[in-house]
Image (cartoon, grey):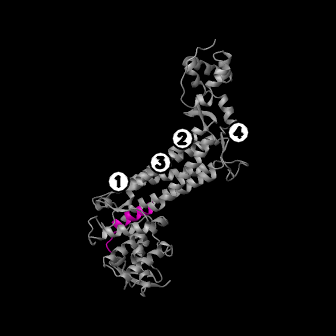
Amino acid sequence: MTNRTEKDSLGEVEVPKEAYYGAFTVRANHNFQISGIKSPKAFKKALSTVKMAAAKANSTLKVITKSQEKAIERACLELIDGKFDQEFLLDVFQAGAGTSYNMNANEIIANRANEILGGKKGKYEHVHPNNHVNQAQSTNDVMPTSTRIAILSMLPALLEEIKKLESELNKKAKAEKNTLKVGRTHLMDAVPITMGQEFDAYKEALVKSRQFIEVQSKDLHILGIGGTALGTGINTDPDFRKLVVNELSLITGLKLKSAKNLTETTNNMNSFMNFSAGLRSLATNLLNLAGDLKLMNMGPKAGISEIELPAVQPGSSIMPGKINPSIPECMEMICFQVFGNDKTIEISAQRSQFDLNVMCPVIMFNLLQSMEILTRGIHMLRTLALQNLKVNRKQIKDTFERSLCTATALAPYIGYLETSDVVKSALKKGITIKEEVLNRKLLSTKDLDEMLSVKSTTRPKRIKTQTPKH
């Protein structure tokens, strides 16, 4: 591979001759061979969008020429379309603040813009990475702004998947509204509940998490671009800040606005931490749902077996015929990863020092990864587990009739102590509570059936105390 020689403030650097990146990217790539993980595509697109908006604003202000703007815009669009994916090559773990990412983009865009204008890679005679592509910008305002736009670009897909999962659970809630089953607390028989009520509870939990995410996302529409290094706006035209935010709003279709205090958006990463808390809330509810699906599916012969999850793959390399709850298990792993990412974001947000928080690269990576795996995971859970889930109504009925969960419904009529004695006696004899009550002639069959009906046991009702029959 032949090289070209570029010179930066540290000296000469050998750069692959055909590369669109330049000296800064070569140095960064040499320094940070850490994980092999590259930046998420959403971030690369958002960063390119910021560069394009800045070029438009600078052209309007006549800080760069119209031909430079058009060349930069074309290069940005090509970068967004994936033409230079192999050139945007830096590890997510890198120097603080994300200067490496910023300069990687600046160099690619500058070299392509020079090419468009008839120049050669590495010469920068028409467009320079710092002087033109990065004009009126700093890594310190570009990175948080790009991260915000990347999150907001991914948000609709996540919210749509949550809504679809809510809808699927709502269908299950309606279909099973009269399926009476054992309710459990502490994993022990408690009181009656319907399968529909349980599904509805899962749905409502997701609704609350979705709404929490939506609320936290509002702060991400407030941008610090135009603040440059410390939020003071050094090296920017007085009108740049407003123009670049307007351009970003037009390009993205988002309702964006400039922050009241640009220094605050430079050193305060709490907006990202708070949004991550919304993802953590969602992951917590998904974890609970996945865990309950596994428990209800437990069996098929030696467990609860209240539901049957679709078989998606063989469950064992050694046990023939075994089927595992593979989809909920994967969902649990996703949730654990989101929890870990959230903790990383929290700790990173606590590392603001004076006028800058340099942890934006790791915050960006963890947030976007959480969003991506949650979006895909929720789709998986809905389509491969919930949609074709079977409710084993006969098993549920048999378990319910053998259980002790109807006892609480009898307490208002025969008293707590009497009911407790009935439970102990039924358990000892191996018979149902209903049989024990009838054997003791405490209530008539008609009254007992009414007291233990779905209507009486799974919703509030007016208690009419009766005199027990002896």
Residue underneath mark 1: 350
User: Among all residues in the image, which is located at the extreme bottom?
Assistant: 118
What residue span does the magenta drawing correspond to? 135-151
Q: CA distance from mark 4 to mark 1?
A: 51 Å
Q: Tell me: residue 165, above or below residue 262.
A: above
Callout 1 secondary element: loop
Is tag 2's residue or tag 1's residue first in the polypeptide sequence?
2
The residue under the point 60% across, 46% down is 171
Q: Tell me: residue 435, above or below residue 136.
A: above
Q: Residue 237 vs residue 92: left or right?
A: left
Q: CA distance from mark 4 to mark 3?
A: 35 Å
The residue under the point 45% across, 57% down is 367
Q: CA distance from mark 2 to mark 3?
A: 13 Å
139 in magenta:
yes
Is tag 2's residue or tag 4's residue first in the polypeptide sequence?
2
Q: Which three-letter amino acid code belongs to the residue tagged 1? A: Gln
Q: CA distance from mark 2 to mark 4?
A: 27 Å
Would you call the spot at circle 4 few (<14 residues within 10 Å), some (14-19), or many (20 or more)? few
Would you call the spot at circle 3 few (<14 residues within 10 Å), some (14-19), or many (20 or more)? many
Q: Which three-letter amino acid code belongs to the residue tagged 4? A: Lys
257 in magenta:
no
Q: Residue 242 vs residue 177: left or right?
A: left
Residue 267, quarter of the rendered image: bottom left
Residue underneath mark 4: 301
- Quadrant of the frame with the C terminus: top right
Residue underneath mark 3: 209
Q: Main secondary structure of the magenta part?
A: helix
Residue underneath mark 2: 201
Residue 178 percent coordinates (x, y): 63, 36
Residue 149 percent coordinates (x, y): 42, 63
Is tag 1's residue or tag 3's residue first in the polypeptide sequence?
3
Q: In the image shown, does 416 or 343 lie closer to the viewer?
A: 416
